[in-house]
Structure formats: C-alpha cells, structure tokens
Amino acid sequence: MPHLQLPNGIDTEQFLTEYWQRKPLLMRQAIPGFRCPLSPEELAGLSCEEEIESRIVLEKDGTRPWEARVGPFNETDYNNLPASHWTLLVQDVDKHLPEVAKLLDYFYFLPSWRLDDIMISYAADHGSLGPHIDDYDVFLFQTAGKRRWMIHTQPVSEEEYIPGLDLRILPEFKAEYDWVLEPGDILYLPPNVAHWGVAQGDGCMTCSVGFRTPTFQEMAAAWCDELLQSQIPEGRYRDGAIKPQAAPGEIIPEALNRVGTLLHKLLESNPDKQARWFGRFITEPKAHLQVYPLDEPLSTTAFLALLQDTAQLSRNGWSRIAFSRGEQCGYLYINGEEFPVTPDLLPLLQLLSEQRSLESVELLTWSETPEALALLTQLFNEGHLEPSHD
C-alpha cells in the first residue's frame, strides 16, 4: 500500500493518537506524485449525469447570496456562470471512477467502513463555500491550482449560522491558521473545525476524502427498528397482581418498576446481535447508489468457469463492505446485507473488504472450498463482484 508523507517524522500511529478527531494537520507534499485523473471539463461532464450528485455554489451573481444549485447540469448552465466566485462539487466520484478510488489506498490505516466518499471540487478564481463547519473527518487533497485555507478551532454552535441561506455560513470568522495549499498538499480537518477555503486563481481542484459520522439519533432509530423487527414480540402491558389504590390517578412506584422491568427485558440484547446490526447499518449505501443483481445469475459451475477464464474480478464501486468476527462464525456485510460464514473463511472476508481488485488465482484457491465458492458466486450474482475493467 502507498503511504502518506506525514510531516516532522510523524507516523500513522502518532497521527491517530494526536490528531485524528482532535486537531488539524497540514501535510506538505503528502502525495507528491498523485494527480486527479479528471480534468475540469471531465468533472463538469460528470455533473451532467442524472445518477451523479452535484452542486454549483455561487457566492454572488446568483439569485441570492451563496446560492446552491443542484445538478444534473447542462452546457447552458456552465455558459451562464460568472467569471469568478463559484464552485462545482461532485460527490462519490470514487464510486464511479476506479482510477479516483485508487486515492483511498493512501488511507489504508483508517477503518474502511468509516469511509463515505471522495468529493471533487473545481473552483473558479475566489470560488468558495464560505466559512463553515462539517460534521465529519475530511482530508482535503489539493490536486490542481492553489487554495487558501483559513482555520478557526473555537467551538461553533448552530445558532451562529446566518439564517436564510442555502449553506451554513458563519457570520464571523477570525482565522487562527492561514495556509495556501498547492498540488500534493493535504489538510486534515477533524469534525466541527470551522474552515474557509478560497481558490487562488482559476483551475483549483480539491479531492475531499470524507468519513461517515452517523448521528446518535440515526443510530438509535436504526437500532430500535432492528429490535422491533427481530426481537420484540407481539403483546401488551399487563398489571399482574395489584391491590386497590387510595388515589387511582397516581402512577405508583410498583407500576413504574413493572414497566421498567418489562422494557429492560424487551430491549436487552447480546453483543453479538448488536455487532451484526451495526455491520448492516454502517454498510447501508446511499439511496441513489444501489447495486442490482444480474438478470441471469450464474451457477457455481458457470462462475468457476468465468473465474478460470479471467485474470481479475473487481469489487463494485457502489458496494460498501465490512466484516466482523462473531463468537462462533464470521459475518460479511455488504450494502446492509449480512452473510454468515464459518471461521475458516475469515481470511476471505478480510480479502474481500480490503481489495478492490481481486486476483482470480487467489480466488480460485478459495473456490476449492464449497462454502467459499457459493459465497463468491452469490456476491457475483448480486452485482458486488464483476469482471475487471482494466
């Protein structure tokens, strides 16, 4: 795996201990040889496609300050843009272009199930999203042109945003750090650090590698849905043995104890069940990035023949993959679906979750195990594995 060039002799363990989700870090020439494989024109072309999420933000010269327009766009939209002070943002580029996904290899030391996407932005001169905060970890990799980043680390509350705008713009911003990033530089920002990036001249392109941070409300809601579907039986509250009350309108302590005992019994869960729920939850894809099965699924025999006839399989860029070790078996999670396997297949789960390109020679070795062959065939038929495009 390639490595980030961290500053001042910092290694990845020190980065995780001292900086990850704690404080910003500027990394000069962290990836000196990597350039974005997309030109500004090609990025604009992606934003014209229906299934790709994109926005154009105009600080001025729009219908209102900091106007955010939602794609897909067309040639007329771009012809009518002003000369400066606008930014194009395209989400999930790594899921559409494998050559962009290669950038993720530099972040192998972070949990891959936390990854959200690579967003690529192009900014005209002075293009900006204004001073704001984000609720996730992000590595801002400058791939072309220059961008000035101003950072403010003091806490910011929701009430401080300017009301009535498309973006959450801070009304006051006093920079504590002020850096200009050039191609190859990376700025890491933990969640909720206020920042303001402004393009210095035309041709500014930035790859933003962002990591998922589900809210407590999202996690609690999903967990409660899981309990309702899989654990809580039908039934109703019952009083049990009770006595006459002097004040019938009073909810007495005995009744509250009964309710508490009942809820505790209904909501209790073992760690293995909770871990399996989380694996399904955290690999759920975005609604517009669903993977669909083959119209004509292959038998294990036909899949084995395909494997013998090709050099590589590729993991579908839209497939979110993780795995966990249970008490008596392993679990593979793909796009919210769970695949239980015997412990012998745990190395295969690790391979599937780490490698975007899978050598057929290695998969053929695994295919000698019937359970592994059945799993690989199922993943291929469901669209998570596909013939390599290289």
Image (cartoon, helix red, strand yellow):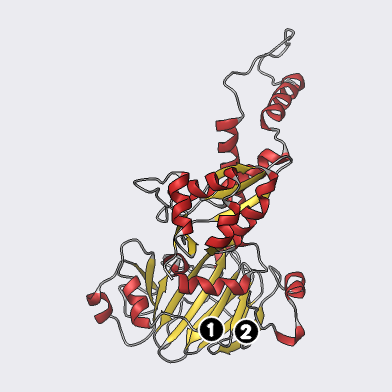
Towards the viewer: 137 or 114: 114
Q: What crowding class fits label 2: few (fewer than 14 Cα within 10 Å), some (14-19), or many (20 or more)?
A: many
Q: Which residue is mark 1?
A: 34
Towards the viewer: 277 or 266: 277
Quadrant showing the N terminus: bottom right
Q: Residue at x 62, y 53 (%)?
A: 349
Q: Secondary structure at mark 2?
A: loop
Q: What crowding class fits label 1: few (fewer than 14 Cα within 10 Å), some (14-19), or many (20 or more)?
A: some
With respect to residue 155, does 84 lie above or below?
below
Q: Name the kind of residue labelled 1 in the image.
A: Phe
Towards the viewer: 242 or 288: 288
> Is there a contact, CB below 8 Å, between mark 1 and mark 2?
no
In the shown orientation, is residue 289 left or right of residue 261? left
User: What is the x, y in percent for residue 243?
Assistant: 74, 8
User: What is the x, y in percent for residue 88?
Assistant: 39, 76
Res 167 → quadrant: bottom left
Q: Secondary structure at mark 1?
A: loop
In the shown orientation, is residue 257 left or right of residue 132? right
Q: Residue at x 43, y 44 (%)?
A: 299
Q: Name the kind of residue labelled 2 in the image.
A: Ala
With respect to residue 301, does 61 lie above or below?
below
Q: CA distance from mark 1 to mark 2?
A: 10 Å
Number of dots carrying numbers: 2
Disc number lying in front (1 or 2): 1
Res 30 → quadrant: bottom right
Is residue 113 visible to the viewer in this orientation of the structure?
A: no
Q: Where residue 30 is drawn, which disc sits there?
A: 2
User: What is the x, y in percent for residue 245?
Assistant: 72, 11
User: What is the x, y in percent for residue 259?
Assistant: 69, 24
Q: Where residue 61 is drawn, which disc sits there?
A: none
In the shown orientation, is residue 64 left or right of residue 91? left
